[in-house]
Image (cartoon, rainbow, N blue to C red):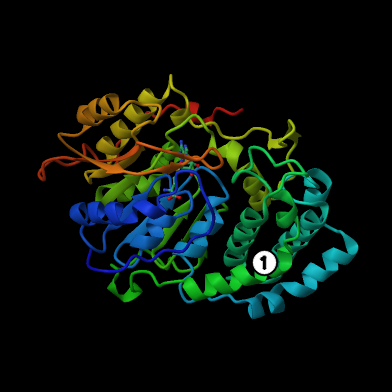
Amino acid sequence: MKHSIPTLHVMRYMGNKQKLLPQIISAVEKHAPPGSIIVDLMAGTHAVGYSLKSQYRIYANDVQKYTLPIGKALLCSDGISVSSEKAKCDLEAFYEENQEKRIANFFQQHYSDTYLSARQCAELDSIRYAIERYREDLPNPDRSDLYLTALISTVCNAQSTPGHFAQFLPPNHQRTQPLRQIRLWSQFLRYADKLGIHQTPSLHPLLLPIEKGSDFRDMLTDQEWSGNANRVFAHSWREFFERKDILEEASEFGLIYVDPPYSQEQYSRFYHFLETLVLLDQPQTRFKARYREGRFMSDFCYRGRVASEFDALLRTTSTVCCCPVLISYGSKGLLPKDRLLEICQRHYEIVQLEEIPYAHSTLGKGNVPDVLELLLSCSRPKNVRASSRHTELQLSRDDQRTA
Ligand SMILES: C[S@@+](CC[C@H](N)C(=O)[O-])C[C@H]1O[C@@H](n2cnc3c(N)ncnc32)[C@H](O)[C@@H]1O
């Protein structure tokens, strides 16, 4: 490795690739020319895109909407800084207004004494209210995604849970009491400082190929964003490859990195609280853990569907793109290694497998020993092109299935 790896830790996240970055970066560097577009198709905390953005352009996507502000903050916010001082100046008056008048109180009403205490929920409502007011009041609310990311870090740090939001610890649990003492506003200000200090720049804009139109700071829709020539999306992988602009650019991609779920745990269940925090859509909640209704169910999390999901994904990438695909998967994942290899070989002529010893965190259930991280690179001989840039994909929309 020629250079140190830029990292910015936002939250503990099931399956995050922070510790595997050296191997992932080496594999990407081996296959993709510098400056080309790397698609991080299931980007989660954006750890991979962040570590690559000084060498490549990043198109990052994930079906969960809470990943969007994190991606915007980590990949598209060069030249925008935050600090506790700026946060106080931008947000404190709105925060105090809500603390006093309780204009926004959804989290206090629905989550008091679950993942956070009633006081912490009230603080959360007020910080979220302040970010929204700041966003509404400005024509170009540059810092709001950095603030939302700092708030996600704050909540994840204060949650009294095993490390995710599928369940909360009982009030008398020895870990609950110290967590309940955390003041969210002070913690939030500390995370604003941390984000400001640790931001590293993207590939220098002057080194980039000329863009269509001006992509800097262009808000497109609430499911995508573009800045610093990086782009962030919140789609299922199928929807991502149904986009006309993506199909038009797909033959230019340098590499697609695929890091799907490998267990039956649905991310929409583990992180439902963050989805509601970002969407602010006041959903109906269900069960003791107060899950959102209508959450996305990924087919990678079903033993009976994961093989056909991989097959559909690789059929799509091999049809619309000519670049290599790099896949991360756990050796004890729902799909056995041999079947995964067989599916890769069905769609790509050259398939290479690297096996990396790696203790996966299961968030609360301890580390699983003897697990390998599989890193599969799938490519074609150099002269083979994707069948067409504008292939009409007949993708089934059965990933829209909801709980
Ligand atoms: C193993 S995690 C990715 C971790 C990420 N590389 C990181 O370092 O933070 C898997 C991700 O896949 C996403 N996901 C699951 N099914 C998906 C689908 N059908 N389309 C897009 N994203 C999906 C989940 O929301 C989750 O963030």
The residue furthest front is 174
* 34 in relation to 115, above or below: below
Within 10 Å of disc 1 (Cα), the crowding (few <14, some 14-19, many 20+) is some
Task: Tell me if I can see residue 139 in this picture.
Answer: no
Which residue is at 81% across, 50% downward?
A: 108
Residue 58 screen position, x and y as percent: 37, 58
The one of 220 and 194 positioned closer to us in this rendering: 194
Which residue is at 59% across, 40% downward?
A: 270
Residue type, label 1: Gln
The quarter of the rendered structure image containing the N terminus is: bottom left
Which residue is at 48% across, 49% downward?
A: 44
The residue furthest right is 101
To which quarter of the image does residue 171 belong? Answer: top right
Task: Tell me if I can see residue 399 in this picture.
Answer: yes
Which residue is at 26% across, 64% downward?
A: 35
* 2 in relation to 40, above or below: below
Label 1 sits on residue: 187
Residue 157 screen position, x and y as percent: 62, 57
The one of 275 and 37 positioned closer to us in this rendering: 275
Left or right, residue 368 beside residue 126: left
Left or right, residue 267 beside residue 392: right
